[in-house]
Image: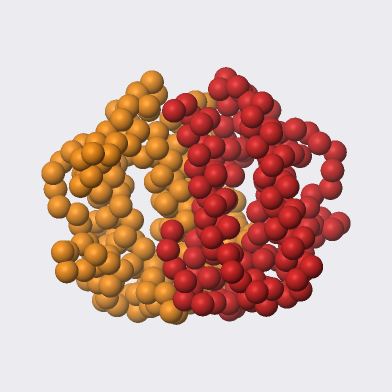
Chain colours: A orange, B red
Amino acid sequence: MSDMWLPEDQDPRTAGNPQGEKANYVEYLANYRLTLGMKCDGLAPEELATRSVPPSSMSLLGLLRHMARVEHNWFQRTAQATGEDRIYWSPEDDDLDFNGAEPTQECVDDAFASWKRQTGAAEEWFAGIDESDLGRELPIAGHPDDVVSIRDLVVHMIEEYARHCGHADLLRECIDGRTGQ
Amino acid sequence: MSELEALRRWLDELRATVERKADGLSPEQLAARSVPPSDLSVLGLVRHLAQMEHYWFVLTLSRADEPQLYMPDGDWDAQFRDAVADAAVAVDAFDTWRAVRARADTVMDHLEPADLEFVWDPDDKVGSVRDALIQVIYEYSRHCGHLDLLREAIDGQTGE
């Protein structure tokens, strides 16, 4: 894991040294979103949907759907109290994000479009948050008695992306042997 | 809760996650390359996490003059390659990791909130105290992802 996924001059991720707490979170989150997308580069729908590390039910496509759902849950349902239902979820299947990952172009296109839509909306919301506001607490969607600070919400997203990028590392290596950070 | 307190709480939760993911495994299971072709194992990752915390907190933030852990002559792969199915190797890895964590905690105990702003190299990819702490959290998180799948492949255990 000491190697990189792409040569430095082709890597879209930034390696600046942003000043301030919020700028750091923005850069880390942007880079891990890019990392998850890069782990899906060049794969066919069948590869994206394959459960390549059995007995785990995870697939790269399932991870994209899962992160669209997580972004929506935190940045829309909690941060902005939109009152919307979860996406890629049903009362009958709490794991619809993973279980519904089908090896079709339609499913892949839908997942990427949905994920991009959610990350765009999340970035737009966070851009409007003041650095001094990071400690502000928000009621958690679906858990009205619990609150989360904006700081914890964003650090949680970074941690969640990083953990799933760890899953993506092994899922991808088991598909075609490609590794790298 | 301050920024520093929040980051420390996240780090403690991730360390506890690693403890849970390794709990109850034999030396053979700890050293198993359970997701081939990957050469990662639970034991290799514990050694790597000890090396990683030592690198950031002891060598970088404290500027201690010590060799990097588990990397003889700078051999990065040794962290993982030399994670063999031997009880003494496993005991050493966990003892070392916990000892490094204690040293790291002492370093963080001495940080003031304003220290997070300190930049030692504006041109470095990770060049500030804040950046280093988030980097450590990121490292733990990504490796916890590896541990999730390694552990599930060993004995089916899943969970946060």
Give percent across and percent down for residue A55: 43, 79
Q: Quadrant of residue B160?
A: bottom left
Identify which residue is drawn at 27% across, 67% down: A95
Q: How many marks?
A: 0
Which residue is at a point 61% across and 71% down the rendered structure image?
A: B25
- Where's residue A124, x and y in %? 28, 36
Tell which of B111 and A88 is nearer to you: B111
Residue A20 image offset from top left, x and y in percent: 49, 26
Asked if residue A9 shows in the view, the reply is yes
- On the image, which quarter does residue B29 sit in? bottom right
On the image, which quarter does residue A22 sit in?
top left
Q: In the depicted view, which residue is nearer to us: A120 or B134?
A: B134
Q: Is residue B10 left or right of residue A75?
A: right
Q: Is residue A176 visible?
A: no
User: How far from the left and from the top, in percent, is residue B94?
Assistant: 70, 58
Quarter of the image where the N terminus of chain B is located: top left
Name which residue lies at 47% across and 71% down. B157
Q: Residue furthest front?
A: B24
Residue lying at 54% horizontally and 52% vertically, measured from the top left = B16
